Amino acid sequence: MIIFVVLILAMMYFMMIRPQRKRMKEHQQFMTSLKRGDRVITVAGIYGEIESLDKDSAVLKVESGTTIRVTRSSITTKRHQ
């Protein structure tokens, strides 16, 4: 019975916890790699170019030339040229 419980816990670790930690680590690396001039997409689907970065926020220049401030964590992906 104890072996069965250990096997279930091991499966939970390899199927749930480990992949989540990997995604978090990749997201952290992505956040630190952001720089001025990067073209990005936010969680809300806003396309923009990074004008400036702060510890917790980023200023994006959108297509119309307007700048908006968004939380840094809301940036999901870099857009390729």
Image (cartoon, helix red, strand yellow):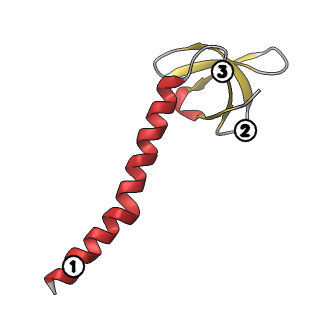
Q: Could you tell me which quadrant the N terminus lies in?
A: bottom left
Q: Could you tell me which quadrant the C terminus lies in?
A: top right
Which x, y percent locates residue 57?
54, 21
Indicate the secondary structure of the residue bearing disc 1: helix
How crowded pointer 1 is (Cα within 10 Å; few <14, some 14-19, many 20+) is rated as few
Tally the marks: 3
Which x, y percent locates residue 16?
39, 62
Q: Nearer the viewer, mark 1 or mark 2?
A: 1
Residue bearing the label numbered 2: 45
Q: Residue furthest front?
A: 81
Q: Residue furthest left?
A: 2
Q: From the viewer's perspective, is 1 left or right of 52?
A: left
Identity of the residue drawn at 51% across and 24% down: 33
Identity of the residue drawn at 52% across and 32% down: 73
Residue bearing the label numbered 1: 5
The answer to whether marks 1 and 2 mark residues whose Cβ atoms lie closer than 8 Å is no
> Is residue 26 positioned above or below 8 on the image?
above
How crowded pointer 3 is (Cα within 10 Å; few <14, some 14-19, many 20+) is rated as some
Question: In the rendered structure, which amino acid carries the disc numbered 1?
Answer: Val
Residue bearing the label numbered 3: 38
Q: From the viewer's perspective, is 33 left or right of 10?
A: right
Which x, y percent locates residue 21?
38, 48
Question: In the rendered structure, which amino acid carries the disc numbered 3?
Answer: Asp
